[in-house]
Amino acid sequence: MLHLYNMQTLAEIEQIVQHYHELGETLLAVAFIAEQFEIHHPNLEGYEYGEKATLQFFLMTTVGHLGAPQIIKIPENTFEFPLLLVVNLLAHEMVHVGQKGAENTILDKNEREWQAYYEMLFHHQFPLVPDAPNFLRKQFAQKGLDYYKRMGEGSEMQLKYAQQQQEVETLLRDILVG
């Protein structure tokens, strides 16, 4: 069982989330998860429902004008999916909430996505977020590396993230070998 400081176990959190889900209170469940795993940013305005998720397409999005408070849109059926996936996707979107704030706006989409996928793998901003299973971490790493490549071969932006790119490549190799 996973115990995180003053948190409940992952199984206890899943049970509470499932209860919210059964009551149709998905937005409350997301807020509960954010609290439990300390996934927050002062630029967050709140949560709203977005497009329904499917096995092929699960999308949370961050919406709002750059420099303004952001809303995270989540599928109403979010909790039909594994909790570790949901927690990591929420952390990804909360990175975007911060990136789109007035203080540290990141204009380039490739840079925003790179930072968010890197967070899903290493949890520097949100250290209480547990690792997703390796098959998901492999997908996160590959998506992140796609955005890294889109920054432009040898570009200033790629150079800025070269050390992190090496960390992701090493993690990906370890996952593929292990």
Image: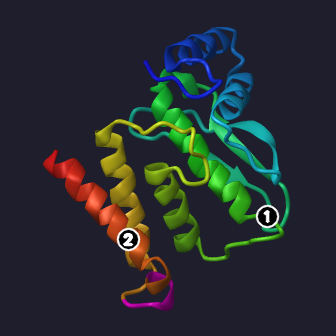
Q: Determine which of the numbered discs, if any, sits on residue 9 in the image.
A: none
Image quarter (top left, top right, bottom left or bottom right) of the N terminus: top left
Determine which quarter of the picture holds residue 87: top right
Q: Main secondary structure of the magenta part?
A: helix
The 10 Å Cα crowd at callout 1, few under 14, some 14 to 19, many 20 or more, is many
Residue 148 in the image: above or below residue 49: below
Kindly report the distance in space between the C-alpha atoms of the residues bearing marks 1 and 2: 25 Å
Residue 59 visible in the current orientation: no
Residue at the extreme left of the image, as rendered:
177
- Tell me: residue 66, above or below residue 74: below
Dot 2 falls on a residue whose secondary structure is helix
- Which range is magenta? 154-158
In the image, is 166 to the left or to the right of 1? left
Q: Are marks 1 and 2 in contact (CB under 8 Å)?
A: no
Q: Quadrant of the C terminus?
A: top left
Instruction: Describe the element under mark 1 as helix, strand or loop.
Output: loop
Q: Nearer the viewer, residue 40 or 93?
A: 40
Q: Which residue is mark 2?
A: 165
Q: Residue at left 46%, top 23%?
A: 2
Please tell me whether mark 1 or mark 2 is closer to you in this view.
2
Q: Can you give x and y, in whole percent of width and height, for residue 120 in the image?
A: 48, 50
Residue holding disc 1: 101
Q: Earlier in the sequence, mark 1 or mark 2?
A: 1
Q: Nearer the viewer, residue 51 or 143?
A: 143
- The residue positioned 36% from the left and 57% from the top of the image is 141
Q: Dividing the picture into quarters, in which one does residue 76 lie?
A: top right
